[in-house]
Image (cartoon, grey):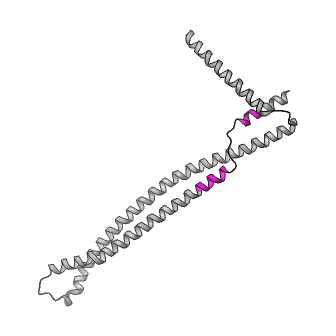
Amino acid sequence: MFKNSILIVLFIGLSSCVSIPKSTPKLTKDIVDEGDAMHQLNISLVNQLFTERRARLNSFITNTYTPAIIEKYQNLLPADVDYKKELPNIIKAIVPVINRKRDSLQDLLLKQQQQIVSGLNTNFISYAKATSSLQNLINAAAKLKTDEENALAGINQLTGGKLNFKEIESKMDSLLNKTGLGMGKLLKVEQIIK
């Protein structure tokens, strides 16, 4: 009798667990792997975007800004200056201005890129922690489900299949529901008495 009581309590404990399909841990891992791949894709896209922006900036500096700055310097020179003779001096004066402008704009692009990548990485770390916790929970639940199935098979083997677990579960649920309703009524009576 005591042995049957322990088996019944063990069954109720095991059967009250949530059912998780066996494929859930693998599917969850696949989703996590897809999230990792999406993060890498996002980083690659950001890097590609800023590579294109730097190329456009260099094109602007070369094709638009440099001719405009050269024209500005030409307009500042007196009319009697010999351009061929003064060209090395003119270039020495212009190139640092162009380089400073290019460097400041490139630095600005780099800072923007780093901010975006940093934000993506921060968000991904939070995502990775959450999915890791979820994966661990799902793995534990799946292992519990397997252990439950093994325990029920062991109980069936020990009892020779004489216990009807569905009927026991149904009666225990009914008993617990009645007890819960009765306790609720007792609490209402207690409140009225006070």
Q: Residue at coordinates 58% horizontally, 15% vertically from top-left?
A: 188
- Going by the image, does 120 lie left or right of 181? left
Q: x, y (%) of residue 124? A: 51, 55
Residue found at x 48% / y 62%: 43
Which residue is rendered at x = 71% and y = 46% of the image? Answer: 143
Please tell me which residue lies in front, 47 or 160.
160
| Frontmost residue, 142 versus 97 | 142
Query: Viewed as shown, does residue 60 lie left or right of 2?
Result: left
Which residue is at the front of the view, 78 or 25?
25
Q: Is residue 48 left or right of residue 159?
A: left
Span highlighted in magenta in the image: 9-32
Where is residue 142 shown, x and y percent of the image? 69, 46
Residue 36 is a magenta residue: no
Quadrant of res 175:
top right
* Above or below 121: residue 96: below
Kindly report the secondary structure that dominates the magenta region of the rendered protein.
Answer: helix
The residue under the point 41% across, 70% down is: 51
- From this view, report whether residue 183 is shown above or below residue 13: above
**Relative to residue 99, is residue 170 depicted above or below?**
above
Q: Residue furthest top?
A: 193
Task: Please check the rendered image and state whether residue 22 is part of the magenta-colored stretch, yes or no.
Answer: yes
